[in-house]
Image: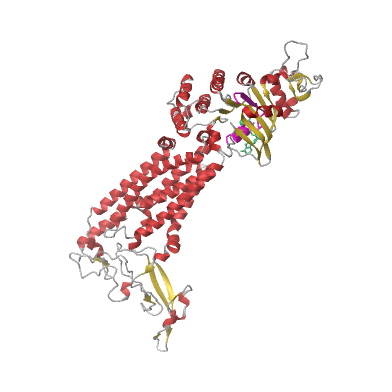
Amino acid sequence: MIARIWLTFKQHRFETIAITVVCVVLTAAALIEAYRLSSLNVPISCFNGRYESSGIGTPTYSAGAHCQALVDSFMGLQSGLPMNLVRPMLLLAPLLAGIVLGAPLVAREIEQGTAPLSWALSGSRRRWLLGKVLAGVVLLVPLMLAVGLAAEVLEGALDPGVDTHAAFQNYLGRGSFDLFWALAAFAGTVTLGTLFGRTMPALIVAFVVCVFVRVAWDPGMARIVLRPMAVEQTGSNQQFGVFYGGGPGIIGVTIEPTPLIEPTPLPEPSGSLGSPEPSGSPAPDGSASDVTAFTPFWVQIDLYSYTQVFLDGKPFYGDPYSLPGYQMQFDANGNLIQSDPSTMPNWVDYAIPGSQYWLVVALESGLLLLGSLFCAAVAFVWVDRRRPY
Amino acid sequence: MGADAGASTATAALVAHGLSKRFRKKVALDSVDLSVPAGSITALVGPNGAGKTTLIRVCMAFERPNAGRVEVDGVDPWRHRSEALRRVGYVPQAPAVYRGLSVEDHLAMARSLHSGFDADYARRRLDQLGIPLDQRADTLSGGQGAQLGLAIALGTRAKVLLLDEPLANLDPLARREFIQVLLDAVRSEGSTALLSSHIVTDVEDACDRLAILGGGKVRLDCPLEEARRTHRLTDADSPPPGATAVGSFLGKGGQKVMTLWRLAAAGADGSDGQSAAPETTSLEDVVLGYLAAGRGTAGLQFN
Ligand SMILES: Nc1ncnc2c1ncn2[C@@H]1O[C@H](COP(=O)(O)OP(=O)(O)OP(=O)(O)O)[C@@H](O)[C@H]1O
Ligand SMILES: [Mg+2]
């Protein structure tokens, strides 16, 4: 089998070398970017500041000038060109690697007429395919683990103070997921190549399918698979409230982000102006300014959060804005008449807690792996039935 | 045909029973009965599109028959593919090689796929032909590539060799050498070969049996010597007694239309009982007669 794997690499040496080079360069680039971020050594407390504007002149940073300089250079790196090249590539690399390696694996043998030679020698086409697929797996596993690890390190550097193994930020684009995406793309593309017997069509269709699946995965998972795991966000249950901003007619709903993973208590930033509120905790007063308040970007945001409308304690699936309790009514003096609470919609936020991180990872990785195995099974069945030309 | 197949089934290395293969409406093989005796080298001859390649592909389980079956060394390749293919060495028509892999890599590949592959044997053969083992296979000449395909097929040391026009790309010397190798392999290893070819002189040199396919049917299946003995070529107007016309074609020089006759089974040796050496017809004329038959009278319409 080792000889088969080696010969498969040789046979597909262009793809093998290209994928290896891209992955190695990408891994190095991600690690370098992570290093540049973390070598700034921005104290966590500095991120807790906010730009405050009195309305006149440049906004001042509440955590102090020293912090401002550090955070500015941090943000500069974060939005710089290298980062904007590396991060999308980290997302694409697993799919591209799987597709580029998978498309020609069987299809090229059929296109170039070498399949009859191998199939005549091997007797068992499945064994023949197994050798080739194993070669792909042997190549993808170390490369994708390296890319995934680098993506993980970079994510940690981008979100200092957040435990990347308890947060869902970009979790599908780092760690072991890179490997599972690559394997799924690989298996799917091998199958398309086996069905089509043509490399280019397999490549193109695989790319379209992969992009679609990758984009649809997040909402699909959240709505269907992971929803039962969501729990009500503490303190998020809030009665519909109407407030007046700049006069009648402007309606806002106060939603206070409440992290499920409590960030480690922050030390007071040195030289702070005033006392910044601890992140995530509700603003002391429910004033209108809180709605527009700048939420520090590093605060844990739970993915898969969704909002369910309740009406009188029961889930309500209609249009909450048409409910009578939502309509504002005024008496003759222009004062707001309080609606009957049972006719007022009630928004409740749900999210999956970060403590479930590994469970979610295991579940979704398992699904990807299952999909890969299913695709591979189709390829193994079909290779036995199809013509070698 | 029929009698022959019945007699030799027990020792046949390759048998086809009522084998039919259709591609959509196109009938490639129409209830073919063929038996290739063990230890023989059988030439499979027929016009373009006669179904030679299709027959060989069915034996390789590349095509599924619509009716009937084949047995390779007693094994049905469609049902027991691995067992059947283990007994077969195969050279496809216009064999392809792996681009970017060296000749040696091809041998390594064959070894890794076929447990019984004799790489040393294949290497020796290629050495004799002066084909460098480290050369990339896609840079070999057409004939050298064919030799590589052949070396791999022979390296399997298979009992049955299915060779689809293996000689088409070879120079005359290489053809002669190949035929010698084939004869040696069959004699020393007791292999059997079915070899499709359009080149009658090669068929004469290499083969001891002739099977002619035409329009998806077996038109003739007998030893070479019998084919020569049981056919006559004459003018269209002077048929030998009791003979049936096979086909007419322009004779050498293009002056006269000649007709091939198949002699009645009773006097099958064609001798009139007086001459000491039986009269024979050249194999080329026999083949031409059957090819012409496949085209109706088209054989008359060259020019
Ligand atoms: N895959 C296929 N799809 C459709 N038709 C096919 C296919 N393979 C073969 N045929 C048809 O079947 C018939 C027999 O083809 P085959 O290749 O067996 O002929 P052949 O005797 O090998 O001819 P040649 O001497 O030119 O190699 C032809 O008419 C061919 O067009
Ligand atoms: Mg052919």
Q: Where are the magenta residues, as a range?
A: B38-60
Residue A207 visible in this rendered orientation of the protein: no
**Residue A372 is covered by the magenta coloring:** no
Relative image position of residue A362 (x, y in whole percent):
38, 56
Which residue is farthest left?
Answer: A271
Residue B277 position, x and y percent, is 72, 11
**Regarding ligand 2, which quadrant of the image does it lie in?**
top right
In terms of image quadrants, where is residue A70? bottom left
Residue at x-position 38% and y-position 51%: A178
Q: Quadrant of the C terminus of chain A?
A: top right
- Is residue B86 something one can see in this rendering? yes
The coloring applied to the image is secondary structure
Specify whether A384 is left or right of B236. left
B171 or A366, which lies in front?
Answer: A366
Which sits in the foreground, A108 or B1? B1
When asked about the image quadrant of residue B176, the answer is: top right
Check if residue B54 falls in the magenta segment. yes
Vertical arrangement, residue A361 with respect to residue A199, above or below: below
Q: Residue at x 66, y 24 (%)?
A: B210
User: On the rendered structure, is A179 left or right of A375?
Assistant: left
Seen in the picture, residue A201 relative to A73 is either above or below; the reply is above
Q: Quadrant of the N terminus of chain A?
A: top left
Residue that protrudes farthest toward the front in the picture? B10
From the top left corner, tell me how far across and down residue B182 is, in percent.
55, 22
Q: Residue, x 26% and y 60% (percent of image)?
A: A161
